[in-house]
Image: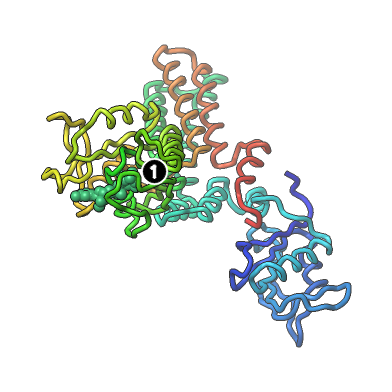
Amino acid sequence: MEVSGTIAAVATAVAPGQGSVAIVRISGPEAEAIGRRLFVAPGQQSWESHRVLYGHVVDPANGERVDEALLLLMRSPRSFTRETVVEFHCHGGLIAVQRVLELVLAAGARRALPGEFSQRAFLNGRLDLTRAEAIGELVTARSRRAAQLAMAGLDGGLQRRLGALRERLLDQLAELEARVDFEEDLPPLDGDAVAAELAAVRGELELLVAEARQGELLREGLRVAIVGRPNVGKSSLLNLLSQRQKAIVTDLPGTTRDLLESELVLEGVPLTLLDTAGIRPTTDRVEALGIERARQALAAADVVLLLFDLAAGWTPEDQALRELVPEAAVLLVAGNKADAAGLPVGLVPAGAGLPAALHFSALTGAGRQELVAELLRRCGAGPLEGLQVALNARQRDLAAAAAASLAAALEAAVQHLPWDFWTIDLRAAVRALGEITGEEVSEAVLDRVFSRFCIGK
Ligand SMILES: Nc1nc2c(ncn2[C@@H]2O[C@H](COP(=O)(O)OP(=O)(O)OP(=O)(O)O)[C@@H](O)[C@H]2O)c(=O)[nH]1
Ligand SMILES: [Mg+2]
């Protein structure tokens, strides 16, 4: 990604007829000059940094007023990118905003790439890489907990935690490298103490890697397919969990014909629930198409909620469906209509011809809480209250690589190999942690990180 020049983009969501305010943001050496070309501020308003001007965006070619707007000038280095930034706060919507952006581009700026403002902020030392990534995560957060985690990252929680671990490794590395070169001149080094410190850091990294799964669930959410024979109560469960009558429920088997998606947040975890057509042999053409979609959803699901009817018991058809569940998927078998069967709700081990299952009633709502808790537990979401920071996928892979390098260094310790055998792996671990925070990172990695951002961020 080129980092020079003046860039511009619409920084707010772009939708016709929506958003009362839209912001066109410019950053770079020409930002102020472009602002002055296009903005007419009446009266005695002065172009001071960090002051708001009121006026009009005007087409310099013909003097036409394009929008009534506010202008905010933030001179370098007191801005998000540390470059001079000018923001036009225009009326929302689409047409006028696009015109303002086009005028800005015609005046000499170029269109910003996704994440380019944040990338400049990073390159100019305004934030480390974990904070920059947290911004992207805050923008895309789908639940309050995900937003809280992103804010913790933005406040530097992740950078401090990883930075501290990296410092501890650097301390050990310095001792070891000194011994490699000047063993005779220095006091003897206690290898056991070094190994203990490396093991402690490795333990913390492994904990962070394990917790990353929960963070991922909070960010990405889960896609859960509810499948089962006709009439077992799949649509009733969708309605129960989404707390509205979204799906049609009748006592006729074969009611649901199509896939029905519902987005919701359970215990802070965003979920996409998928209600499917009951799977059975049928001669009805429409139903058959729905069933085909249900089978596809089943085959592609990460998480399958397989429902059966407790009043009817576990039938060979239920067993056949269970065998269709992909091996890699998380499966929760749930018995519905506990009320009709006169059975208690909750997690029940296999017995009396029934498989191990979570019993509940979509009609009365009994067992709902247990069902949600068990579903999240199986997906690795567990209780999320204690989670303070969470690595994203990129950070997790690097933390895991660092932990693996430390394991290799510890192997050298066990074998009492010379110090330089320890330092090779230790240095790799330091490098991996530096890549998380951005202290040691290649341009290609940066491009990948920032290209996932939205334009204007
Ligand atoms: N007694 C009782 N009846 C239930 C319960 N859950 C659903 N039902 C009833 O079972 C019938 C079928 O419910 P649906 O939710 O439409 O079942 P489905 O699995 O979506 O059915 P298809 O769309 O046809 O595959 C309806 O009459 C529901 O009222 C329950 O927990 N207890
Ligand atoms: Mg249904």
Residue drawn where x is 74% and y is 57% of the image: 7
Q: Nearer the viewer, residue 79 or 134?
A: 134
Whole-percent x, y for residue 371 in the image: 25, 45
Residue found at the far bottom of this picture: 43
Residue 104 sits in quarter: bottom right
Residue 385 appears anywhere in the view? no
Whole-percent x, y for residue 214 in the image: 39, 42
Secondary structure category for the residue under label 1: loop
Residue tagged by mark 1?
276
Residue type marked 1: Thr
- Image height check: is 145 above or below 307? below
Residue drawn where x is 88% and y is 72% of the image: 61
Residue 403 appears anywhere in the view? yes
Specify the quadrant that holds the N terminus. top right
Q: State yes or no: Cβ of the residue under disc 1 lies below 8 Å from any atom of ligand 1.
A: yes
Residue drawn where x is 38% and y is 36% of the image: 282
Horizontal side of residue 98 vs 107, given as left or right: left
